[in-house]
Amino acid sequence: MKDRAPGLRDRLAAIVAGDDPRFGNRFDEAMLIVILVSLAALGLETVPAIPGWLHTLCIWIERASILLFTAEYAARLGTAKKAWKYATSFWGVIDFLAVAPWWLTMGGAGFQAIRSLRLLRILRALKLVRHLAAIDRVRRAFELVREEMAVFGLLALILLFIAGVGIYEFEHEAQPVAFSSIPQSLWFVVVTLTTVGYGDVYPVTTGGKLFTVLILVTGIGIVALPTSLITTGLTRAREEEKARKQKPAAEQT
């Protein structure tokens, strides 16, 4: 008995999910272009010296992109096996919020309060992630190293607290305002580890300076370790993906 040919709904579902062998990748690539163009237009709209024709073009790009995003949302909602499950999922909410503010703010002067919702337009940037095939690999990489990352996170918190207590002990008497408490000292430790700096607050005692150097050296390890873990996870995820692709080819032979 021959398999039933996929219907229009099944074909559309495969296309928007990126699984269709002919149009799946093309759909993702087209949506990526639409998102990038719409974000560029969104940024150009705010330029004060923009020519009138270019501002008008940005408005039309905004309208066209909203119509395309709305059609995409309707297609995903209509082809989902469980529409409510898609609508309440992370990407379903993002897809909805990317278009809903525009439609809600078409009501004129009486909708000035709702117009603030247009700030949610920036959420369409998150739609970029949906159409990047590599995002599944990144997600899988985090799944593979999540236990190691959890242990590292706990150790990092312990080290931060120890560093906060240490710098407090060294600097509290010399700078009772800047290092008034351990929580205040923790803030100094965090911004020092991230190399952001903390304005006019810096250690003045010899012990505090030496301890800050130790904090900075520790910060290098704090940054390097999760990077190596994620790199390892990405390598493993790529190997798994390669093995999955090779398996069907081996079965056919």
Image (tube, rainbow, N blue to C red):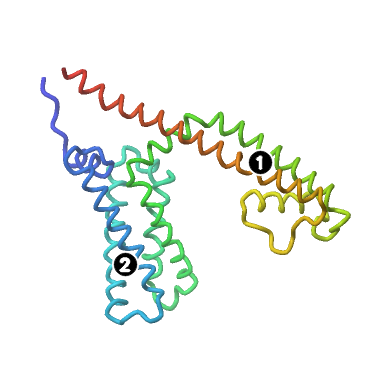
Q: Residue at x 69, y 63 (%)?
A: 199
* Place of residue 164 in the rendered image (x, y in percent of width and height, measured from the top left): 76, 46
In this rendered view, identify the residue nearer to me: 106 or 50.
Answer: 50
Amino acid marked by disc 2: Glu
Q: Is residue 206 left or right of residue 142?
A: right
* Place of residue 8 in the rendered image (x, y in percent of width and height, measured from the top left): 17, 42
Amino acid marked by disc 1: Thr
CA–CA distance in space, label 2 to label 1 = 47 Å
The residue that label 2 is drawn on is 62
Mark positioned earlier in the residue sequence (2 or 1): 2
Q: Residue at x 28, y 53 (%)?
A: 31
* Place of residue 150 in the rendered image (x, y in percent of width and height, measured from the top left): 59, 33
Q: Residue at x 76, y 46 (%)?
A: 211
The residue that label 1 is drawn on is 218
Q: For the view shown, which residue lies furthest in the right direction?
A: 173
- SS for callout 2: helix
